[in-house]
Each structure stands twice: as C-alpha cells, then as structure tokens.
Image (cartoon, grey):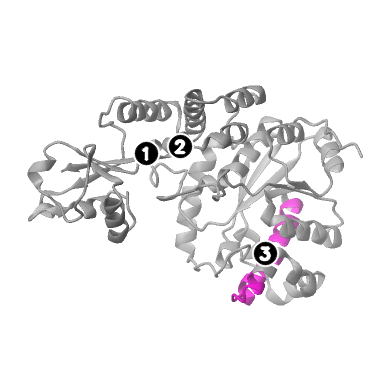
Amino acid sequence: MTPYRPKSDFLTVLIERGFLADCTDLQGLDEALMAGVVPAYIGYDATARSLHVGHLLNIMLLRWLQKTGHKPITLMGGGTTKVGDPSFRSEERPLLDAAAIEANIDGMQQVFDKYLRYDDSADGAVMLDNAEWLDGLNYLEFLRDVGRHFSVNRMLSFDSVKTRLDRQQSLSFLEFNYMILQAYDFVEIHRRHGCLLQMGGSDQWGNIVNGIDLARRIADAELFGLTTPLLTTSDGRKMGKSAGGAIWLNAEMLSPYEFWQFWRNTTDADVGRFLKLYTELPVEDCERLGALAGSEINEAKIRLANEVTTLCHGAEAAAAAETTARAVFEQGGMGEDLPRLNLEPGELEGGISIAQLFVRSGLAKSGKEAKRLIAEGGARANDVVVTDAGQMVQAAELSQPLKLTAGKKRHALVTLG
C-alpha cells in the first residue's frame, strides 16, 4: 500500500523532520489543515518552575504549527496537576498546593513566550488553564455525564496503567482519574475554542484516544490526535537528562552556557536528527551537517548548540556561550560565562575541602560522588588533577577565580565575594 502523502504544510514538515509517530486519521487531519486554521493543543502539568529539554520536542511542534498558519493552544494543568499523571511513572507525583502550581505556571509561561506568539490573530497562540473548568466540577454530575462513558476494563489495558500494575506498584484512585480528566479537557477546549487536534508524546496515545472517543459520544464532534516519538539518544539515554540532572529551559535554573554545552556534547550519531527536530535549518542543511565526520562534526555540533540556544535564550547568549567554550577548550582559559560558585569570606575560616567545592558548584551531587570523581582522576582544579579529596582550599587561594573541572566537559568557577 502506498503511504498517504499529506498536502498540508504542517504535516509535510512533521514527516520530513521526524516529528510524527502516530495519527488517528492522517488524511482527515490533512484535509482539515488544508480547509482552514486548525486550533491544536498540548497539555503541560505544572510540576516544576520550568520546562526542560524533554518538553522541547513538543514545543517545537507547536512552533511549527504556528509557522504553518495554525493556532497553538498551550494548556496549563492547574487542575490536573492536583491529581498527577500516572503515565509510565513508578510512583505517585507529590501533590502541590495552589500557590506552588501558580508559581510553576508563571515560570513555564516564560519559556513558551520565547517560542510562540501570543495575540488575538487567527493563528495567535492561546494559553489556557484547565482549573477554569475542572475546579468547579460537581462530582456526582461528572460521574453521571462523563464517567459512565469510560470502561474500567479498557482503562486497565492502557500501557500507562498496565505497566504500573504489572510491576505491582501502587496506583491510587486519584491518579486513575487522570485519564478521564484529560479526555474531558479535550472536549472542553473543543467547545470553548473550536480545538480539533490534541498532540503529545507517544506515551499519551491512550489519553488522546480517550478524548476523541468522549467528544464523539457527548459532543458529536470528530477530533484528531497526533503523537511524537519518545526520544532517546543513540546511546539509549532518555532525552533531556544529563549527569548533572534535568536540562531546564529557564535561564534561572540552568545557565545559557550549560544549556549550550549540553547540545555541543551531542553524540555524533544524533547531530543530524537533532538539527531537524530542534532547529529551523532547512532539512537538506541538517542532513549535510549530520553527515560530516571526523573533526568537522564538531563544527556541526557548535551549529546545533548555537541554533537551539538562540531560540531558547537569544543570539547574544548563544554567541557568549560559544566564546566561553572556545576560551575554555581551545585556549585553556577561564571563560567568563562559566557557572559560578561565589563564597563569602566567613565560609572559609579554616578552609573548605576541594570535594565540598565540587558539590557546592554542582559538579557532583554528593560528597561520595565527588570523592569517587577524584579517586578516578576525573577532577581538576585550574587544569591540575586533584588527587586528595581532603585537600583544603584557603581564602588566599581564591584571590583569583578557581576553575573546577569534572571529566572533560563540565566546568565551574569558584570566586570569593
């Protein structure tokens, strides 16, 4: 069978650049996209003050949606965050109060503002909060009008639930309600904003299909669902994770230099794929750069880091990060833009151990990890290998910034305030 070839710009971009995993009705969605502006949403629970690189694939999906003339809807889970999505999690999420959720939404909005244009135009992005319709629900009415359309047998068959139960891990009734609430979100956004499409990672397939089925039953609406692949790096790691933790998209939680460095350290085999997914370079340029080998692939990685950092933090931050990286790696310098640990003189009475400095600067998660790093020869101070975890650093030694290095690519400066 000849695969369907979409005519709409949006689906053409998705397929060419590797965004598409599944779609409930590719031809039907393509026809809707050709007929006029299609509002589409992705939901984000407010579990942290920032989004991270794991969210970036779907943020780029929304950006391409808008660039091809359609309307992105970013749905903040002010309501569903109070329940928690059990999808492929081993344990229940910690419950947050209203103030924490609101603060998290504010931080996340700062990220979306960099990628999407929010205004009143036909394709202007809209930000919604599902607390608007979920907080006021009458429980008995909701059970009668919505809950009756859900089969517990079918809900138990979804991978997101089944995986948890197969591992004999607890799944609370609170979390079990999540998929019903997400399905109801789709119906409400359709009713209020004419939304025709829900998008998300492939782990959300069951939840998306639930929403489409519910809309057909209670609103007589034909809606669409589309998912992106769950991304792992070529060496099998989950995208967005590093030795230092999550790669946050807010500069307050991760410096632009560290963000830039994450992309600069991309594995050779992933460069071409990441250029297609995370930048707006033409596909042919992405393929050409991704095919480079030897020392030339490093310039492709710098191009990737610059393009992604420019979108997230601006061209000036990207240029500063590249300048710092070249100073540190090529010229052996300190680099003005490196992450900094500023110590007060009172903290250095009697000195501070070098292992503690690696922990305080974020280069090691614990004293145990710092000691192991030193024992394995992976720690340096001012480019000299550290051999003694108990080595004490005195205030006089910080008259000039002290550069700490973990492994080959992670650096920080220690200064005295």
Amino acid type at mark 3: Ser
> Where does the magenta region start and end?
164-191
Identify the residue shown where x is 48% and y is 66%.
96
Q: Which residue is mark 3?
A: 160
Q: Which of the labelled discs sits on residue 233, or is there none?
A: none
Residue with the mark numbered 2: 265
Magenta residues: mostly which secondary structure?
helix
40 up-or-down from 91: above or below: above
The mark found on residue 409 in the picture is 1
Q: Residues within 10 Å of mark 2 (few under 14, many from 20)?
A: some
First-in-chain label (2 vs 3): 3
- Secondary structure of the residue carrying tag 2 is loop
Q: Which residue appears at 57% of the width and 36% of the height?
A: 269
Where is 413 relative to 140, above or below? Answer: above
Residue 167 visible from this viewpoint:
yes
Q: Position of residue 274 (x, y in %)?
A: 58, 35
Q: Which residue is pictured at 34% across the width and 43% down the height? A: 407
Report, in whole angstroms, how far the alpha carbon at label 2 lies from the one at label 3: 32 Å
Residue 194 visible here? no
Residue 265, given in percent of the width and then of the height, sits at: 46, 37
In this picture, residue 181 sits left or right of residue 77: right
Looking at this view, name the residue that lies furthest to the right: 1
Q: State the residue at coordinates (37%, 39%).
A: 409
**What amino acid is labelled 1 in the image?**
Lys
Q: Earlier in the sequence, mark 1 or mark 3?
A: 3
CB-based contact (under 8 Å), mark 2 and mark 1: yes
Residue 60 is situated, as x and y percent measured from the top left of the image, at 61, 38
Quarter of image, res 103: bottom left
Q: Where on the picture, by quarter, is residue 78?
A: bottom right
Quick one: quadrant of the C terminus? top left
